[in-house]
Amino acid sequence: MVWGQSATRGIEDLVQRVTSNDPKLQSLTILRQRRFGHEDVAALAHALKDNTTLTELYASSHPLSLASVQLLAETLGSNRSLRSLCVGDSSLGDSGVEALARGVASSSSLTRLDLTGKGLGRRGAAALASALHSCSSLSHLVLNNNPQLGDEGFAALFTTAPSASAVGTACESAASAAPPGSGWAGSEIVLEVQGCSVGAAGLAAAAQASSNSGRLRELHLQGNSLGLTGARALCQLLQSTHHLQTLHLRGTELGDDGGEVLASGLTAAASAAGAGSSSSGGSTLVAAAGASSVGHLDLSGTQAGPLAVESLSRVPGLKHVSLVGCPLAAAGGAALAASLASSGGSSSGSWPALEELCISGTGLSISDTSTVFAALAAGGAPCLKSLEIGANPAAQDDAFLAQLDALRSARPGIAVFWRSGDDPAPGAQQ
């Protein structure tokens, strides 16, 4: 990787290396200390047209004029090597994103586009949706820290039709704008919208646009205030996603009730993946064929508690669960211990596929860890390989090490992390 040197100068030396197709120059980061005005952009864009070695270009935090963005967009249509792109700053805005999206649509190589903190709103999102319908190589879209995006912008990502000003109308257009069978060109998409003011309305709109939402492989929603209503909307979305494997919900304020609702939705979606429909709480949830089975779930800092824990234990296919910072305390610890005990070491019981469990900073006392460790020692969560349990009151108790030794003796295949340097790999203990 080439980093711009700490001096206020242009990028002539870097442009020369791009022009000469330097085989060692595969990733280029232009730091703020470098000048990156319109003439510099023009020179780099011209050099990139015939370049075949550069795969990553990062020029974030540099303000770009609309004319500069248009030059970069034109380059994307002719360059065949660039796979990852991040340019501009918060002044890029919808107009800049619209211009860049036209180039993305014509790219045959771009796989990752990072527009974190670029002032993106609904219009920019709609332009990106059009690009997603044309660019089959694009598989990772990063839109984090764009609070102007909101529900309308999120809904616009799932349709090529312009969203109306009202969220309700935007939700309807997301479901109806694209013709049946049409959708994003990429087969599986990673979408990151952390801190983008996305709520229940946006999630419900995405659920209706199944031709696009069905292509989500990972969804990152950290830092969006979802609550119980958002959890219910997520359940709708789960029924329309066919490839979703990873769901990041850190800090989304689901609460214990929301966590329970989401877990029920995950169970229904996982069951629907094999059966086509499922029932939860007395009401039938009819799923699209091939509904997703999420394996990686991050609920850190969501206020999940005993209700969520008990319900999560019944979700088939969950391999990684993080509850870091959730106030489990005594009630949550008891629910976890009971669910682990009920698995009875069987792959058909509770936590049947769980491989990683992160419960650091959840307020567990020494009596809580005693019951949890005992349930694990007896064979609970039979596939478990990694347990993170640091920053809990129990770890400060003199009896903790004895509990830990007993667990390691009974389950040497579980790596227990509770302080820096513990268990580099499952089964590493002697």
Image (spheres, rainbow, N blue to C red):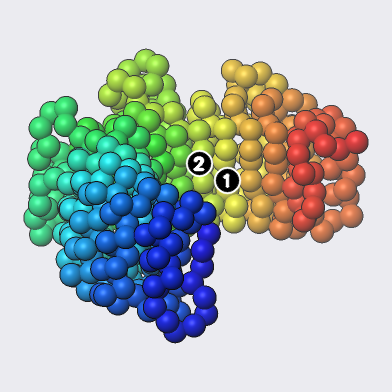
**Amino acid carrying mark 1 in the image:** Ser
**Can residue 357 be seen by looking at this rendering?**
yes
Q: Residue furthest front?
A: 20
Residue 322's tag is 1
Tell me residue 51's x, y (percent).
35, 52
- Place residue 164 in its image quadrant: bottom left
Label 1 to label 2, Cα distance in Å?
Answer: 7 Å
- Place residue 321 in its image quadrant: top right
Q: Quadrant of the C terminus?
A: top right
Residue that appears at 21% across and 53% down: 103
Residue that appears at 51% across and 63% down: 2
The secondary structure type at the circle numbered 2 is strand
Tell me residue 403's x, y (percent).
85, 42
The secondary structure type at the circle numbered 1 is strand
Q: Nearer the viewer, residue 290 or 83?
A: 83
Q: Is residue 285 above or below residue 328?
A: above
Circle 2 Cα neighbour tier, 10 Å, few/some/many (<14 / 14–19 / ≥20): some
From the viewer's perspective, tell me whether residue 287 is left or right of residue 384: left
Residue that appears at 52% across and 75% down: 5
